[in-house]
Image (cartoon, helix red, strand yellow):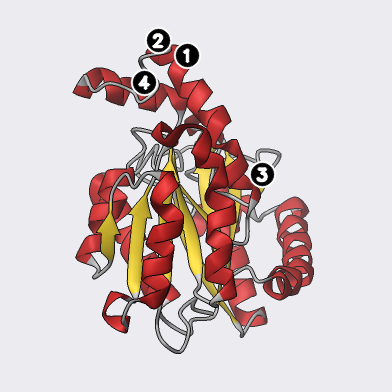
């Protein structure tokens, strides 16, 4: 279900790792009609929220970005957000994340200074910031984690746009099943990660290496033995049981990642089959699928 109340009011708190795309995310929200404030000092958050609560509905969509430059006051954010609960204004924490190695490369390419650069070398500043931000990851029902490691700017913009549309609609619970390759890294935004590298691999079959798991012949090879069928049925049963529990908890989205070595064959075939079955089973759930490493 969407987040917006009958008045349509909603608040986004944008934060996360420096260099992961907070400014880009805020720009996308502004393009989507949000009133945006960048780098608001946390000490002013209470006053800002008071003004927001009393504002007219012309400021019904508000987003602010904060980071660890607020110092020790950063840890008062959760207390400040409780005001929104009192006034029944829905909010979401958008947490932008990225692999440390990619963050390091981005900083070297742009030659920008890290917020903690005065106290630490860059290689030490990044893990230090990650540690300082960790408490914000402890509120999963309010948290939307966006891993920008593999995202281009246009992909991040589309992700933000899709999120705002969902939050302002009465859309169904969203189940996302996606494939990936372990050699390209485990996706950080997955709620569940499953490994199907135990299945027979079409990569070593003549004529199949350069094809994908969406190809009927490749899929038939993956499902030739009983293991693939049993895996899908067990996943189907598991998700059929766990989804109502997440929905009852107030979650609106569940991300299920299924990986093989390269993300081209086995995981793709499994995701395609599983998503088809779940869509038939779960009439009250919107099932989406994608293949992260399909074109790599």
SS for callout 1 = helix
117 relative to 211, above or below: above
Residue that carries the numbered disc 3 in the rendered image: 196
In contact (CB < 8 Å): disc 1 and disc 4: no
Give the numbered dot on residue 121: 2
At 49% from the left and 78% from the top, the residue drawn is: 2
**Cα distance between the residues tagged 2 and 3:** 40 Å
Residue that carries the numbered disc 1 in the rendered image: 124
**Cα distance between the residues tagged 4 and 3:** 32 Å
The image quarter in which residue 131 lies: top right
Which callout, 1 or 3, points to the residue nearer the camera? 1
76 relative to 272, above or below: above
Percent position (x, y) of residue 224?
A: 67, 54
45 relative to 188, above or below: below
Q: Nearer the viewer, residue 206 or 117?
A: 117
Give the numbered dot on residue 104: 4
Percent position (x, y) of residue 231?
A: 74, 55
Residue neighbourhood size for the residue with mark 3, other residues' Cα within 10 Å, grouped as few (<14), some (14–19), many (≥20) = some
Q: Which of the two discs, 4 and 3, labels the residue nearer the N terminus?
A: 4
């Amino acid at each position: 279900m969407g987040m917006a109340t009958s008045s349509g009011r909603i608040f986004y708190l944008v934060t996360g790792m420096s260099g992961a795309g907070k400014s880009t995310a805020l720009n996308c929200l502004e393009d989507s009609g949000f009133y945006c404030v960048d780098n608001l000092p946390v000490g002013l958050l209470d006053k800002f929220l008071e003004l927001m609560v009393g504002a007219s509905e012309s400021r019904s969509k508000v987003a602010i970005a904060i980071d660890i430059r607020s110092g020790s006051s950063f840890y008062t954010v959760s207390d400040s957000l409780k005001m929104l609960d009192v006034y029944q204004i829905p909010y979401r924490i958008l947490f932008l994340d990225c692999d440390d190695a990619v963050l390091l490369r981005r900083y070297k390419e742009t030659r920008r200074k890290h917020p903690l650069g005065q106290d630490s070398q860059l290689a030490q500043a990044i893990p230090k910031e990650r540690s300082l931000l960790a408490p914000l990851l402890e509120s999963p029902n309010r948290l939307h984690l966006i891993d920008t490691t593999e995202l281009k700017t246009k992909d991040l913009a589309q992700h933000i746009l899709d999120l705002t549309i969902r939050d302002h609609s009465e859309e169904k619970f969203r189940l996302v099943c996606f494939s990936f390759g372990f050699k390209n890294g485990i996706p950080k935004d997955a709620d569940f990660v499953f490994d199907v590298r135990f299945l027979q691999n079409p990569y070593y079959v003549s004529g199949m290496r350069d094809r994908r798991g969406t190809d009927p012949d490749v899929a038939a090879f993956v499902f030739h033995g009983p293991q693939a069928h049993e895996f899908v049925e067990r996943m189907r049963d598991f998700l059929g049981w766990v989804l109502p529990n997440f929905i009852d908890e107030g979650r609106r989205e569940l991300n299920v990642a299924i990986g093989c070595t390269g993300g081209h064959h086995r995981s793709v075939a499994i995701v395609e089959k599983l998503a088809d079955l779940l869509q038939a089973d779960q009439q009250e759930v919107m099932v989406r699928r994608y293949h992260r490493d399909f074109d790599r």
